[in-house]
């Protein structure tokens, strides 16, 4: 396998998203600090403010709905109101009953679900390839999640909810109930792994996100929706290529978060094609993926070339399955245009910098969010991992930091690669994944070690910060501290 080119091509007209709101982040931090001193007053005021935001969302939904454009001034107004409310709720989450979620925090979570519902309704007619539209989707969906998570991370772990629900589209697919949520054949699961490479996948694009992996759900037909043995996923893993896994195997693979997406009912059963075949399009896509995964070995596609299904990366499993039914996913492609980030990804074998990225599927108008699972402690670990990777990528951009490997280990790595190749021929898994070169394997080893060292240094800073302030640092503070540690290594 040829080594990755250091000067990989990038999309000509793409550019990284930038909030450019350092002053606003500073003002939100000041707002949070001030709010902690006046919770009795905010306990009376916050319900009124949260209700007013909810009323604004409901009024927009009822009066304008799908006629609300991406550039409407209502969106930035809602964004500001939501961020400010989140800062106050993080400081004063409200009263609790037993082990439940504090009242204000619960209301904010409900508001985020309603805000998501509004934009999912409005974006049906939006063009996700338009830059301004893409930025609005990102600011609202990613931004509101980040704001809510800053609230959750200030709560005691046992009081932070692990599940947020949205309105589920109708489906003709077979379904089962998993953790009190109805999961159906053809649904898509976005998740976030715990490895440094997972953080790099999630953050290494023009719109840094929260997810690094995609799995397509298949549910075998049956009447008993409590029978989770009917549930399986089809997914591509670096180590083994495309595989089929049951619920136990899916949950055993460590995940920091999971988001469940479902195609719009109108997408898989359009009115002009309202027949049995079109209503079963989502299940047919899952059946297509399952049939191929059980019929043949499909190697992992390190190049991330979504146009060539001979090998597949995780997103490609879902997009190719739906394409077989005439349904397009990822209407807005994932791009990586920063040359420094592209070089890093190229060092790990990526060749395509306009592709199907896991995080960007959330912004696709063809899909609707149904549920999101977040474990509070895993959530903080995810924020820490993200901050370290963001700092490393910033070092690549500003200081020219490059991905390294130990050349003295290369002879041994090549022996392990040969041993892995032999094991692959007999259906086993070796220490170096199929399709990965010995040099790339050493680069992954370097990334893991570098990330672990910076993570340990960051956690020490977090501990001192908490001792000094009495609360966890917000995400932008984590990135600042990670950058300070990076400059010392």
Image (tube, helix red, strand yellow):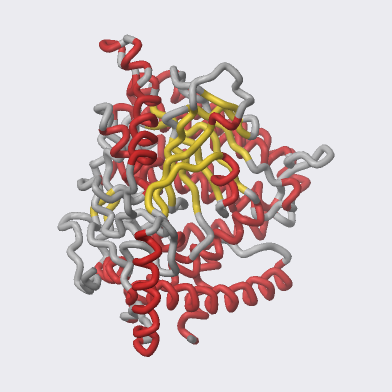
Vertical order, 50 against 345 (above or below): above
Most distant residue in the right direction: 98
Residue visible at 43% across and 41% down in the picture: 234
**Which quarter of the picture shows residue 274?**
top left
Residue 72 lies left or right of residue 451; in this view the side is left
Q: Is residue 274 visible?
A: yes
- Residue 351 in the image, given as x and y percentages of width and height: 23, 61
Q: Nearer the viewer, residue 79 or 129?
A: 129
Q: Nearer the viewer, residue 10 or 268?
A: 268
Vertical order, 174 against 134 (above or below): above
- Residue 457 in the image, given as x and y percentages of width and height: 58, 78
Vertical order, 361 against 252 (above or below): above
Q: Is residue 255 visible?
A: no
Residue 290 lies left or right of residue 220; in this view the side is left
Q: Nearer the viewer, residue 365 or 96?
A: 365
Tally of numbered discs: 0
Residue visible at 31% across and 63% down in the picture: 435
Q: Quadrant of the N terminus?
A: bottom left
Residue 92 lies left or right of residue 209; in this view the side is right
Residue 247 lies left or right of residue 233; in this view the side is right
- Residue 328 in the image, given as x and y percentages of width and height: 27, 33
């Amino acid at each position: 396998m040829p080594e990755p080119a250091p000067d990989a091509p990038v999309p000509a007209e793409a550019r990284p998203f930038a909030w450019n709101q350092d002053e606003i982040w500073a003002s939100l931090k000041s707002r949070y600090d001030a709010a902690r001193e006046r919770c009795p007053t905010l306990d009376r005021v916050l319900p009124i403010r949260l209700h007013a935001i909810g009323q604004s969302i409901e009024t927009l939904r009822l009066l304008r709905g799908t006629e609300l454009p991406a550039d409407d001034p209502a969106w930035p107004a809602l964004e500001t109101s939501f961020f400010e409310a989140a800062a106050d709720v993080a400081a004063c989450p409200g009263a609790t009953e037993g082990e439940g979620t504090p009242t204000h925090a619960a209301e904010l979570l409900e508001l985020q679900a309603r805000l998501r519902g509004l934009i999912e309704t409005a974006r049906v007619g939006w063009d996700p390839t338009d830059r301004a539209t893409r930025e609005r989707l990102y600011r609202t969906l990613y931004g509101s999640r980040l704001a809510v998570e800053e609230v959750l991370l200030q709560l005691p772990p046992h009081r932070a909810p692990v599940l947020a629900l949205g309105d589920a589209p109708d489906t003709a697919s077979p379904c089962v109930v998993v953790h009190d949520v109805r999961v159906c054949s053809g649904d898509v699961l976005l998740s976030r792994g715990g490895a440094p490479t997972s953080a790099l996948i999630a953050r290494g694009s023009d719109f840094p996100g929260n997810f690094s992996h995609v799995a397509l759900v298949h549910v075998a037909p049956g009447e008993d929706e409590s029978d989770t043995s009917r549930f399986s996923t089809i997914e591509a893993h670096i180590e083994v290529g495309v595989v089929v896994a049951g619920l136990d195997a899916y949950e055993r693979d460590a995940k920091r978060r999971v988001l469940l997406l479902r195609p719009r009912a109108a997408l898989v059963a359009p009115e002009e094609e309202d027949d049995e075949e079109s209503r079963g399009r989502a299940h047919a896509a899952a059946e297509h993926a399952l049939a191929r995964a059980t019929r043949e070995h499909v190697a992992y596609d390190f190049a991330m070339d979504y146009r060539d299904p001979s090998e597949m990366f995780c997103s490609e499993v879902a997009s190719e399955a739906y394409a077989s039914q005439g349904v397009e996913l990822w209407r807005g492609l994932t791009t990586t245009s920063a040359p420094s980030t592209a070089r890093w990804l190229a060092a790990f074998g990526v060749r395509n910098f306009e592709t199907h990225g896991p995080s960007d599927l959330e912004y696709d108008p063809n899909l609707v969010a149904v549920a999101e699972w977040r474990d509070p402690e895993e959530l903080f670990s995810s924020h820490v991992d993200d901050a370290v990777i963001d700092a490393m990528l910033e070092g690549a951009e500003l200081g020219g930091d490059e991905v390294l490997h130990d050349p003295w280990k290369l002879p041994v790595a090549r022996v392990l690669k040969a041993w892995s190749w032999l094991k692959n021929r007999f259906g086993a898994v070796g220490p170096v994944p199929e399709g990965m070169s010995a040099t790339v394997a050493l680069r992954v080893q370097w990334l893991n070690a570098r990330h672990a060292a910076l993570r340990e240094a960051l956690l020490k800073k977090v501990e001192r910060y908490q001792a000094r302030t009495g609360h966890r640092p917000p995400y932008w503070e984590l990135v600042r501290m990670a950058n300070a540690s990076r400059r010392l290594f």
